[in-house]
């Protein structure tokens, strides 16, 4: 966790990135769950923003997953990103 606030680094990172690239940041829903497999970040965005989040050939979401893995390994956590069906 970072010292500036109580949000975990992985959650703060993904929240900043997603809200920066979408057109409707108020519709973004991010959940963070911890289990025996590690950390799971569940992301829901509007249908109109789904393409921006996934990117061409999945490159944007793949880059976010790689960066989350790096953040997680720095904190000895396994961090995964799941994108759920879009919000209408």
Image: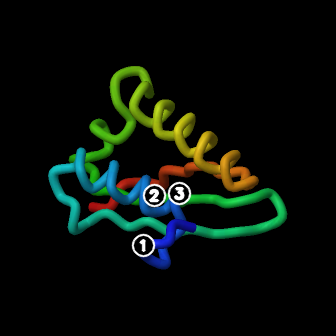
Which one is earlier in the sequence, the residue at label 1 or at label 2?
1
50 and 14: which one is in front?
Answer: 14
Mark 2 Cα-neighbour bin, 10 Å: few <14, some 14–19, many ≥20: many
Which residue is located at x 59 percent, y 47 percent? 71
x then y, percent, for residue 60: 39, 32
Identify the residue position indicated by label 2 in the image: 43
Mark closer to the observer (1, 2)? 1
Mark 1 Cα-neighbour bin, 10 Å: few <14, some 14–19, many ≥20: few
Identify the residue position indicated by label 1 in the image: 4
Which residue is located at x 49 percent, y 50 percent? 83
x then y, percent, for residue 35: 77, 68
Marking on residue 70: none
Q: Quadrant of residue 26?
A: bottom left
Which residue is located at x 43 percent, y 53 percent? 14
Which residue is located at x 44 percent, y 65 percent? 30
Mark 1 → mark 3, Cα distance in angstroms = 14 Å
Mark 1 → mark 2, Cα distance in angstroms = 24 Å
Identify the residue position indicated by label 3 in the image: 10
30 and 70: which one is in front?
Answer: 70
x then y, percent, for residue 1: 57, 67
């Amino acid at each position: 966790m970072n010292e500036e606030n109580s949000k975990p680094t992985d959650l703060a990172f993904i929240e900043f990135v997603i809200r920066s690239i979408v057109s409707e940041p108020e519709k973004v829903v991010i959940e963070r769950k911890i289990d025996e497999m590690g950390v799971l970040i569940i992301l829901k965005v509007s249908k109109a923003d789904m393409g921006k989040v996934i990117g061409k050939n999945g490159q944007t979401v793949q880059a976010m997953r790689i960066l989350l893995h790096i953040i997680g390994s720095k904190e000895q956590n396994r961090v995964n990103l799941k994108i759920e069906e879009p919000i209408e």
